[in-house]
Image (cartoon, rainbow, N blue to C red):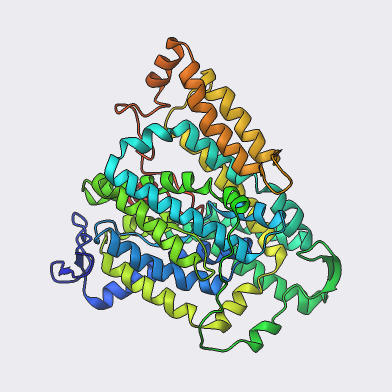
Amino acid sequence: MAVGWKLHGDGKAPPLDEAVAPDERLSWPLTVGIGAQHVVAMFGATFVFPLVMGLDANLAIMMSGIATILFLLIVQGKVPSYLGTSASFVGGVAAVRAQGGDSADVVGAILVSGVVLALVGLLIQVAGVRLVNRVLPPAVTGAVVLLIGFNLAPVAAVVYWPQDQWVALATMTFVVVVSLALRGFWARISILLGLVFGYLLSLLLDVTLGQITSPDGTGTVVTRDRVNLDAVGQADWFGLPSPTWPSFSVNFSLLVLPAVIALVAENAGHVKAVAEMTKRDLDPVLGRAVLADGVGTVVASSVGGSPTTTYAENIGVMAATRVYSTAAYYVAAVVAVLLGLVPKFGAIVNATPGGVLGGITVVLYGMIGLLGAKIWKENRVDFANPINLVPLAAGIIIGIGNVTLVFTETFSLSGIALGTIVAVVGWHLARALAPAEMKDALYREGGFASGTGPALGATGRHTMDPGGADPSDVDRGDRAR
């Protein structure tokens, strides 16, 4: 069942050698406390990513709670996880806006990707996990994740950083220092702490130094306050967020669609991680998890919310507490929905200065890209093999360099979309044409999931949520401390 839990022992925190299973719970006061931890863990990335995508952060947080409830119901409570805002879509959204798309076009393209992701989940549920491993081997998945992250570099460098270069530099430095100097939970929310630091620093500079003359978000040089709180005073304390109804375009949908590959890989890795921690075989519900993520994305984007994905931050909380109860996730989801009903909170979030986002995004986008390299490393992908080297090299440069292939006046492929197609199709074409010795080397190196080699996400460690920690690292760190 997705709802209904047995009391674990006497309802108190479990002993060191025990864990609270997904279908169990602690006493309700302790469960609420654990749920609150999950809210804080997901919070930073869940409202930072909507900001950089130009979407309503308050609505995104509210819909993340609704998506989480849908996820838990669809997986029948077998995979405890929180669905926060996905970083995988940031590059595609930036491409949509660069081609003149507005927020309606953005959420329409995201909704189409959600439908495709849900269909992929159904296919996995019917055909089995091996299908994912064969179509999207680690070599290809790593390339797609890498080009998604690094394609965003101009957004950080051209749009956000110039708005206040010194606040951006200070915020970036703060994030780096905090992520290394702090431990455990606090290190995992370094992005959130950096945002708060940069926000407060900007307010202080407005009071002490006055207004700044610099480019705004459109690139126009203006004299202005770093933090504009006019909308905060006008916002109500309670009320529903304003929806954005989706608008659909084939061209825009193709720009965002590559994110589906990253989400399939991400969900696979997270399900594997939870399976390892709970000592349960969750492969039979992997398809349901991907389906549920797709449904969550469709529901969220249908009213203007952000795309969703399972969050490593919350998996890290489970690893640290040994409490895998889905009851805590329902608590976190309800809290997120309630936060979404406070427009004044959303106005404060939406007033985040561009310079602060500049400092955060240079770290965030780079981390997204490097997660692709992490997938390669963990799966021992060999770039001495031309099957891996040649097509992926082409796809990555096309993605990062925003190369455009024009078909007609109204239809073209560029950047992430074109790079992904070249990487995926090119890799499979290269494998089909390669001589036998190259194919044999591919199986031996583990760069292709043959059924015996490492499968996509088999380590359970990679994630597209940069604020998250490797669950195994969390566990090792807690024991060391």
Number of numbered discs present? 0
Q: Is residue 121 left or right of residue 468?
A: left
Which quadrant: the N terminus? bottom left
Q: Quadrant of residue 26?
A: bottom left
Q: Residue at x 34, y 59 (%)?
A: 81
- Residue placed at 57% from the left, 77% from the top? 346
Apparent side of residue 346 relative to residue 226 in the rendered image (left or right) = left
Q: Position of residue 197 (x, y in %)?
A: 62, 67
Image height check: is 462 above or below 207? above
**Image-based side of 7 in relation to 49, left or right:** left
Q: Is residue 209 left or right of residue 427?
A: right
Q: Quadrant of residue 159?
A: bottom right
Residue 41 versus residue 409 in the image, above or below: below
Q: Is residue 291 above or below residue 56?
A: above
Instruction: Examine the rendering and report whether any part of residue 481 can be seen.
Output: no
- Note whether residue 55 is visible: yes
